[in-house]
Amino acid sequence: MATSPPSSPERSEHEPETDVPRPAWWIYRGSGQPRPYFDLADVLPPAPPWRRFDGGPVLPPPPDDEVEMTRVLGPVTHVEPVHRPAAEVEAVNAALRLRRPLLVTGPPGIGKSSLAYRVARELKLGRVLRWPINSRTDLRSGLYEYDPIARINDISMAAAGARQAGREDEGAAGRSAGRSVGDYLRLAALGTALLPYPDRSARIRHGVVRCSSFPFIVITSNGERPFPPAFRRRCLELHLAEPTAEQLADIVVAHFTERTRGQDRELIDSFLQRYQSLGGLSVDQLLNSVYLASTGVPVDTGSSDDNSLNRVLKLVWQRLTEAGRE
């Protein structure tokens, strides 16, 4: 780990250019593209004394899930500029240095979850672990999962085998062949994130999972309910605003590498107008419409002709909130 804040790293010829100079303290730059020859441990300062942990032994990070990364962010290209808001990049860098969770709020579909993928890909943090939370979620479900049915089945099969073999102590045979309780435990997203081990299995001592470094955590919320002050105090808050035309163009060309930035400008402008009139749409809805256009559906956003894409857009660009639904 570095003992002092890193100086401004040299830009690789493979990294995209931006119009905004990067402050020297930025480790995450917002490109969402993997940094060549980059190791986060070489540039990230030590954690604050109150955020240090002693779990171990420390092993290399888990492998990337490039299939999932490509599904969310599009393929790695290294050719297009990025237009991430400075406030977003600053919030990520502050969360990285302070080892604090990042609480990301904003309308549905605006790209809150994809922020975690951009950070993971650029900084080579490995695969993103997802933990959906609702009103019935408890802490245990995030730490581990227990499969009692599989254990009962194994013990029953072992006992049946003992009976067929004519053994007298069927219970002992079943317990022996049924293995231990730990064989039926699987760490869930939070439990895996807290491990210093990237392996498929790890030895848990006295039921305690302890990280060696606090994981980068992104908590997303649509803002449907307020958070208590104690929870907010433990997080850094970031509110994602309405995307700009340039940011949407970045997203489109990231997923449709054969299309140019200006090719879908009219469609993006119409999407933003619809976004504002309905009080919010999902970026995924824009990608769906671009895909339709790329597969031959005629695009004429200014036409009322029912045979144009205009009618299809009304189907694809549905309001996401219940209030004022058309």
Image (spheres, grey):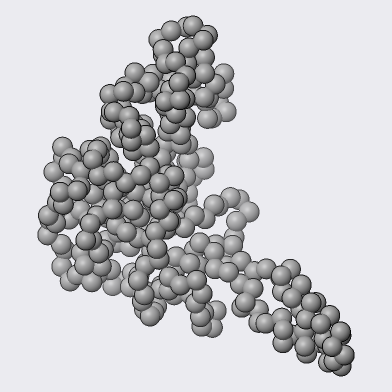
Residue 96 sits above or below residue 313 on the image: below
Residue 287 sits above or below residue 116 on the image: above
Q: Find residue 2 and report its horizontal and vertical position in percent.
A: 19, 70
How many numbered circles does the render carry? 0
Q: Residue at x 48, y 12 (%)?
A: 308
From the viewer's perspective, tell me whether residue 133 is left or right of residue 45.
Answer: right
Q: Find residue 248 and report its horizontal and vertical position in percent.
A: 34, 31
Residue 168 sits above or below residue 65 on the image: below
Q: Quadrant of residue 291?
A: top left
Q: Find residue 123 and report its horizontal and vertical position in percent.
A: 29, 57
Q: Give the quadrant of the N terminus.
A: bottom left
Residue 268 sits above or below residue 152 on the image: above
Q: Give the quadrant of the C terminus.
A: top right
Q: Residue at x 43, y 56 (%)?
A: 65
Q: Find residue 165 and report its horizontal and vertical position in percent.
A: 84, 88
From the viewer's perspective, tell me whether residue 185 is left or right of residue 230.
Answer: right
Residue 251 appears in the rendering: no
Q: Residue at x 55, y 79 (%)?
A: 207
From the viewer's perspective, tell me whether residue 154 is left or right of residue 5.
Answer: right
Q: In this rendered view, identify the residue nearer to me: 26 or 170.
A: 170
Residue 78 appears in the rendering: yes
